[in-house]
Amino acid sequence: MQDNLIAPTPSAYTYPLLVKQLLLNALSIHGDQEITYRGEQRYSFRQFRVRVGQLASMLRGLDVQNGSTVAVMDWDSHRYLESYFAIPMMGATLFTVNVRLSAQQILYTLNDSRAEVVLVHAEFVPMLEEIEADLKFVRQVVVLADGELMRPTTLPLAGEYEELMACASADFEFPDFDERTRAATFYTTGTTGDPKGVAYSHRDIVMHAMGTAMSLCVPREGQRLHREDVYMPITPMFHVLAWGMPYIAVMLGLKTVLPGRYVPERLVALRQSEKVTFSHCVPTILKMVLQAADAHGQDLTGWKLMIGGSALPPALCEAALERGMDVFTAYGMSETGPIVSLAQLPPGYAPKDRQDEVRMRCATGRPVPFVDFRVVDENMEDVARDGKQQGEIVLRSPFLTKTYVGKPDASEELWAGGYLHTQDIAIVTSDGYIRIVDRIKDVIKTGGEWVSSIEVESLITGVAGVQECAVIGVRDEKWGERPMAFVVREAEMGVCVEAIRERLMQHVDAKRISKYAVPDADHIAFVGEIPKTSVGKINKKLLREQSRA
Amino acid sequence: MQDNLIAPTPSAYTYPLLVKQLLLNALSIHGDQEITYRGEQRYSFRQFRVRVGQLASMLRGLDVQNGSTVAVMDWDSHRYLESYFAIPMMGATLFTVNVRLSAQQILYTLNDSRAEVVLVHAEFVPMLEEIEADLKFVRQVVVLADGELMRPTTLPLAGEYEELMACASADFEFPDFDERTRAATFYTTGTTGDPKGVAYSHRDIVMHAMGTAMSLCVPREGQRLHREDVYMPITPMFHVLAWGMPYIAVMLGLKTVLPGRYVPERLVALRQSEKVTFSHCVPTILKMVLQAADAHGQDLTGWKLMIGGSALPPALCEAALERGMDVFTAYGMSETGPIVSLAQLPPGYAPKDRQDEVRMRCATGRPVPFVDFRVVDENMEDVARDGKQQGEIVLRSPFLTKTYVGKPDASEELWAGGYLHTQDIAIVTSDGYIRIVDRIKDVIKTGGEWVSSIEVESLITGVAGVQECAVIGVRDEKWGERPMAFVVREAEMGVCVEAIRERLMQHVDAKRISKYAVPDADHIAFVGEIPKTSVGKINKKLLREQSRA
C-alpha cells in the first residue's frame, strides 16, 4: 500500500486536525457574535480570541509547556471556555476537575493527571488547601476571584486570573502539531476502584464536534441546531467537556451563554433574558428547571433540550413536552466522546399519539455519522432488528477513548474484540432505533428471566403520586434475584404499595412487562430520597450495598 | 511531544477516515432511501450497498488490487455512484475520465494515471477503440451497455457491466487501511501543457464531505441542505467528483436522482417528477435549464441551486431568482476538494433591494469550516477587510491537493509559502464576505491601473440585447494593455457598440468602474459565439491567442 499513499514531501503541507481550527469560522464569519457570563459580562468572539492568546501567554509565563497538564476548577464561565481552547491549542492538556468529587478523590485525580498548574475558583480554594500537603505535582495556582476580593491562601499562588490576564500578551503563536496529541483529560468514576482517566486527543475533539454537529444540523426542523440558535450548557463544563457542545457552539458561531453555578431559578431567568434556544442536561436538572419555571410562571416554549447522563423518564419527557419544550435523548459515555447517538425524530414523523412521541424521544436514538454502532450477542454477531433480541452496544468511531491512562487491563477489557464495549444492553427496531434496556450489571435475573431495572423504574415513575424511583436486584433464595423498588413520593400526594402494584399488573396485562418484573409487596420501599453519584445518576452500587447490609 | 500522543497499543483500535464510513449512517438510518437513474430504474440504499459489494468482487475478479487504478467513462448514473464507493473502498483508485476532452487528451490521462481497467459507456467505445493501440496499461474493459444491445469491439472486453454484476458476490470484505491512501484522481486542464493529475485521499474526501455538509446544513433556512431534500447533480460526476456532493448526499441519506447525460428538457422534467430540491451546476447549464423550463412552462420554485465553475453573472442570478430558485455561489477548484467557500446569505439577512441580494448570492462567499481562507498581498500579509484592497486567495484545509501527480515543480509553485495558491484575486468586506475580482492572469493592466475582466464582463452582460460577453487584455503600445470585449448579441435584439459604451460610461459616472476599464469603440467585437473549454468555461487562452494572430 505504501506507494498508494498521498504523502506530500514538504511537511508544511500537512494539515492536522486541531482544536484551534474550531475557531477559524468563528472568527472569519462570526467575529461579532457574543459570549456572555451569566448575562453580566459579555464580549465578542473576536475578543474571546484575544483572551485565548492572553491565557496561553500567561500559562507559558508559568512554564506550561507541550505536554504539561493544567487543571481547572470552576463553574461554567467564559474563563472555562477560554481554557477549553488556550490550553489544548498551546500543546498542553486541559484537565477538567470534577468539583463534585470528594476532596480525597480530587487529590487522587490531581496527582494521577500530574497537574502542574491549577486554575481554581475562589470557592474551591479551601478544598485545595485541605489537600495541599499531598499534592505531588502542582507548583502554581491561579485563583479565579470572580469579581470578589481574594482571601490570603497557603497555596503556591501565581496570582489572580484577571490580573494575570491583564499583563499577558495576546500575541501567542499557536503551532501545528500531531493531531493525536492529548488535548483534554477527565476522570470517570466507575463503580469500583479509583476514578479512571479518559483522554481526548485533538483529533477526537474535532471529529466529535463535526459528527455531532452534522447530526444536529441536518433535520429540516425539530431537535436541530442552526446558526441562529442561542446556546447555554447545563451539563457542567467540568463533566466530559460538557458533552463537547461548547466546541460545537464556537465552531458554528452560536451566541453562547455561560451560566456559572447551576441555580435553577437563574437558569430559567437566563433562558428568558438571553433568549436561549438550545441546551443539554441530565434528567434531574430538567426536573429542577421545570419546577423553577412553574414557580415563577416562566414560559419554556421552544427550548430545545438534549437529555443525557441517564435515561429520560417518559413522565418527565411528557411534562417537558407539555410546556412546549423540544426534549430528546443524547446517548454516550465519558469513553465515547461522548455523543454517539441522538433520539431525533425521523424525517416526516407524525406521532400516532403523545405516548408514541414520548417513546421516540426517550429512546437511545440512532447513530451520529461516522459511528459504527452495533448491538451484538456474546459472539459479536449483530442482533436481529426486531425490537426484541437484546445485545450489548459496542462501538467504533473516530473519537472514542483509545485507552484508560495507565490502566492497561481496563483498556483491554474496554476494547475486547476491537470494539468499545459500553456494557449497555439494548434492542434495535426495524427502523434502526436503538433502545437501551439496562446496564449489564443492573439487569435483574429472576427465575431465569431477565428484567430491565430501567423499564420497571419508568413504569413506577409513571404512577400518580410517585416522584422518583430506583429499582435494583436483591438476592433471593428461590428466584436468584428479585426486583426491589425504592420510591420517593410526591410531598402532597399519598401513594401506597398496592396502588403501585395494581398499576404494574395492568402493564403486565397489557404485555408491557412480564409478571416476574413486578416487585413483591415487601420489595417496595418508600424513602426520603434516592442516593445519587457525583454526576447526578442514581447510585445503584450504594443501593445494592445498603440492601445487602 | 512524543510522550503526549494518544497512541493505542493494539492497532485494531485506530479508526482511519475512509470512504466506506460515509455509508454507515446511510445504511443504519436510511436503508430504505431511494436512488434513481433517470427516474427509470430505482433501488434502495440497502440494495446500493449490495451492488457496491458486487462491483468490488467483480473488479477483484479482474485482478484489481490495492493501488490499482480503475477508470470510469460514463454519464451520471447509479453505476457511477457505485464506482464512487466500491473502487476506493477496496483500496483502488477511482479515475473519473473527463469524457469531454479530446481523444488524444483522454489517451494521455489514461496512460498517465496507469489505468488498468476501464468501465466505459457504450457511447464512448468508438473513442476508446480509436486510441486503443496507444493505451499502455489498460488490460480489461467493461462495457456499460445501459440497456442497449452491445456491438462487437476490438477492445480487451471483460464483459458487460450488468452481466458481470449478476455473477459477482455481494460479500466483499472492505478492509481498513491508511486514510492517506489515494481514493480518486482527476485531471485538470490548465492553460498550458498536458492535463495535470489531482489526487484525493480517503481523508480528503471524508473531511471535504463533513466540512461542506456542515456549512450547508447549519443555516436556519435558505441555501441549505436538510434530511428531506432530494438531490440531483448537474455537475458531471466525471468532473471533480461532482464537487463531492454525491458523497454528501449518501452520507446524509438523501434521495438521489442521477440524470444520465444532461439534456436540459430531461433535467427539468426529472426535477418535477422526482421532486428534486437541491442541485449544483455551472452558469451555462443554469441558463439552459431556465430556457428549457420557459419553453415548457415548468415551475422552478424552491429549487436550491449551487453555482460554481465560473462566476455567476448577476443578470443570470436575477433571472433564476425571478423564477423562485434559491441560487448561490460555491467556490473552489479541482485542487481544493473542491468547495472552500459558499455564498450563503448571512443569518437574519434582509436584502436592501434585489440588486443587493444578487450581489450577495454572486459573491465568492464565506469559508466553510476548517478552511484557513486568506486573501494576501505579495508578502503573504492579509489584506484589509475594506472591500477595496486586492490580494490573492491562498488556502489551507484538511482536504486540499497535496501534490500534482508526478509534477514536483508545479506542486512547489502551487504550495509556495505553505499555502495553496489559487491565482484568484479577491477583496474582503468587513463582514468577511470574499469577492473574486479576477484570475491573476486575466487581470488587465492598462496605464498602470488594474482592471478586472470579470467586472467589465458582468457590466456588459447586463446591457439589454447582450447574451454573453468575454473580456481580455490585448497589447497596446501606449497603455501596455487595453480591454477587448467579445460580445454575443441576443438573436432578436440589436445592440450597437455605442449603446454598450454609453451604458458603461454611466457605470463610470456611478463610480462602479474606472474610465480606463471601458473598452474603446474598436475594442468591442460582435461574435457568433464565445469559445469554451471542455468544462464550459470561457476559453480566454484561446481568445488571447486569436487576438494576437
Image: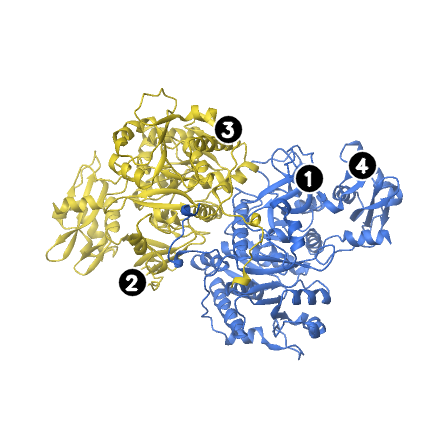
Chain colours: A yellow, B blue
Residue on which the image places disc 2: A378
State whether discs 4 and 2 lie on one chain: no
- The quadrant of the rendering that contains the N terminus of chain B is top left
Q: Chain of mark 3?
A: A
Residue on which the image places disc 3: A169
| Amino acid under disc 3 | Ser
| Residue A214: percent from left, percent from top | 48, 48
Residue on which the image places disc 4: B448
Identify the secondary structure beneath mark 2.
Answer: loop
| Residue B373: percent from left, percent from top | 60, 42
Q: CA distance from mark 1 to mark 2?
A: 63 Å
Identify the secondary structure beneath mark 3.
Answer: loop
Q: Chain of mark 2?
A: A
Return the residue nearer the eye: A279 or A520. A279
State whether discs 1 and 4 lie on one chain: yes
State whether discs 1 and 3 lie on one chain: no
Give residue A222's quadrant in the image. Answer: top left
Q: Earlier in the sequence, mark 2 or mark 3?
A: 3
Identify the secondary structure beneath mark 1.
Answer: loop
